[in-house]
């Protein structure tokens, strides 16, 4: 009788480690699945700069996707879209159509890009900045001697901006090359009511300078 009672007591004790091990294995498996589900990631190269209010091409890179799958890429606003195909390592790099800003003229906006695997539905998102290559003045028209507010966007960060008549405005900052400055609407003497000027970042004028913005300034009569 004592042997039988000992057997009944020990039997559950032998099973407990097995049950614990099974539970641990199940938790470990679910952890691996969660890690695999969140492994996808995407990124956008630099600031996306639109010229003449036309959408620019943007470079998107991704990792962690299933090999050989088609990846749909789209922005939540602005109409940016395109597709990519992952390689044998689950990576891709593709040029797609970027989004249009909701504003005209100088400025930048943030956008969200989503990548969706057409085969298994896996997704990844990222945010990026886009800007118009533009120069805006406020007010848009003024007397030649009056200072106005200039706003620049889409230029190369760290470089000075100038107008061909040798007016310097400062250095562009941030990924999208933004700059705000106060300056005379036109740096020369008034002879005409309108002037076509070029804004660029070169030391000497060239019609081929890049990036550049060519626009007409309207001068009020004195």
Image (spheres, rainbow, N blue to C red):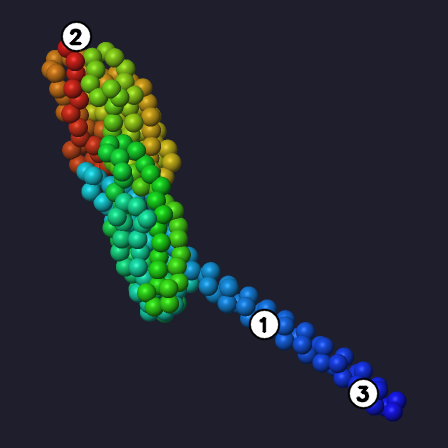
Sequence order check: which comes first, mark 1 or mark 3?
3
| Residue 186 in sight in this render | no
| The quadrant where residue 135 appears | top left
**Secondary structure beneath disc 1?**
helix
Mark 2 closeness class: few <14, some 14–19, many ≥20 residues within 10 Å = few
Look at mark 2 in the image and give the residue it sits on: 222
Q: Horizontal and vertical percent for residue 171?
A: 35, 29
Cα separation, mark 1 vs mark 3, equals 29 Å
Q: Which residue in the rendered view is the most extreme toward the top?
A: 222
Percent coordinates x, y for residue 13 in the rendering: 76, 79
Residue 26's mark?
Answer: 1
Nearest-to-viewer mark from 1 and 2: 1
Q: Nearer the viewer, residue 6 or 120?
A: 6
Q: Residue at x 31, y 50 (%)?
A: 75
Marks 3 and 2 in Cβ contact (< 8 Å):
no
Q: Is residue 4 above or below residue 30?
A: below
Quarter-wise, where is residue 202 in the image? top left
Q: Which residue is mark 3?
A: 7
Q: Is residue 9 above or below residue 126?
A: below
């Amino acid at each position: 009788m004592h042997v039988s009672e000992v057997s009944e007591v020990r039997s559950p004790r032998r099973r407990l480690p097995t049950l614990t091990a099974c539970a641990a294995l199940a938790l470990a498996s679910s952890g691996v699945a969660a890690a695999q589900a969140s492994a996808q990631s995407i990124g956008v190269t630099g600031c996306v700069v639109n010229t003449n209010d036309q959408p620019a091409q943007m470079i998107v890179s991704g990792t962690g996707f299933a090999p050989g799958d088609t990846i749909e890429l789209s922005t939540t606003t602005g109409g940016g879209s395109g597709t990519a195909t992952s390689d044998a390592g689950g990576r891709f790099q593709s040029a797609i159509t970027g989004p249009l800003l909701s504003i005209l003229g100088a400025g930048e906006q943030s956008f969200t890009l989503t990548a969706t695997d057409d085969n298994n539905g896996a997704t990844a998102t990222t945010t990026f900045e886009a800007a118009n290559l533009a120069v805006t003045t406020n007010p848009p028209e003024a007397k030649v001697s009056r200072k106005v507010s200039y706003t620049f966007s889409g230029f190369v960060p760290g470089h000075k901006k100038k107008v061909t008549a040798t007016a310097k405005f400062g250095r562009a900052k941030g990924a999208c090359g933004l700059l705000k400055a106060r300056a005379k609407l036109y740096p020369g003497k008034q002879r005409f009511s309108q002037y076509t000027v070029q804004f660029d970042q070169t030391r000497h004028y060239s019609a081929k300078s890049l990036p550049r913005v060519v626009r007409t300034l309207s001068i009020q009569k004195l």
